[in-house]
Amino acid sequence: APDGSVGIAIASTADTPLTVPLRLDGATYRLRNGARIRRIDDTGATDLGQWKPSSPPLEIQLPPRGACVVELGMSPSGK
């Protein structure tokens, strides 16, 4: 996106709930320390915190045949 944010679409075709580990590589996604992480799905947007180089993989929970977008954006301060 022009503002530098990135969206990662995650979907499941499984008939059962699924946990997807998502490791965010700062170099690949050009993440800065403190980048905002949000999950967007059919219920709305949920703040997942801020990224830092030592962040563990995210555990994305999906319902059967569920989908979401993980949005990586600038820190609240815009830096």
Image: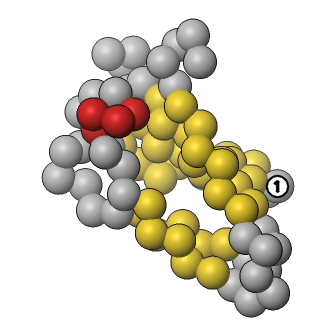
Answer with the quarter of the image where residue 18 lies.
bottom right
Residue sitting at the far left: 54
Answer with the quarter of the image where residue 13 lies.
bottom right
Q: Nearer the viewer, residue 42 or 1?
A: 1
| Residue 8 image point, x, y percent | 58, 44
In the image, taking residue 20 as reference, residue 50 lies left or right, namely left
Up the image or down, 4 lies above or below 55; here it is above
Residue sitting at the far top: 2
In the image, taking residue 78 as reference, residue 42 lies left or right, namely right
Number of marks in the rendered image: 1
Q: Nearer the viewer, residue 78 or 24?
A: 24
Q: Secondary structure at mark 1?
A: loop
| Residue 71 image point, x, y percent | 56, 39
Whether residue 72 is visible? yes
Q: Residue at x 59, y 18 (%)?
A: 1
Residue sitting at the far bottom: 16
Q: Residue at x 57, y 10 (%)?
A: 2
The quarter in which the C terminus is drawn is top left
Q: Which residue is mark 1?
A: 42
Up the image or down, 45 lies above or below 30; here it is below
Q: Residue at x 48, y 18 (%)?
A: 4
Up the image or down, 76 lies above or below 15; here it is above
Whether residue 35 is visible? no
Type of amino acid under label 1: Asp
| Residue 41 image point, x, y percent | 74, 53
In the image, taking residue 51 as reference, residue 10 lies left or right, namely right
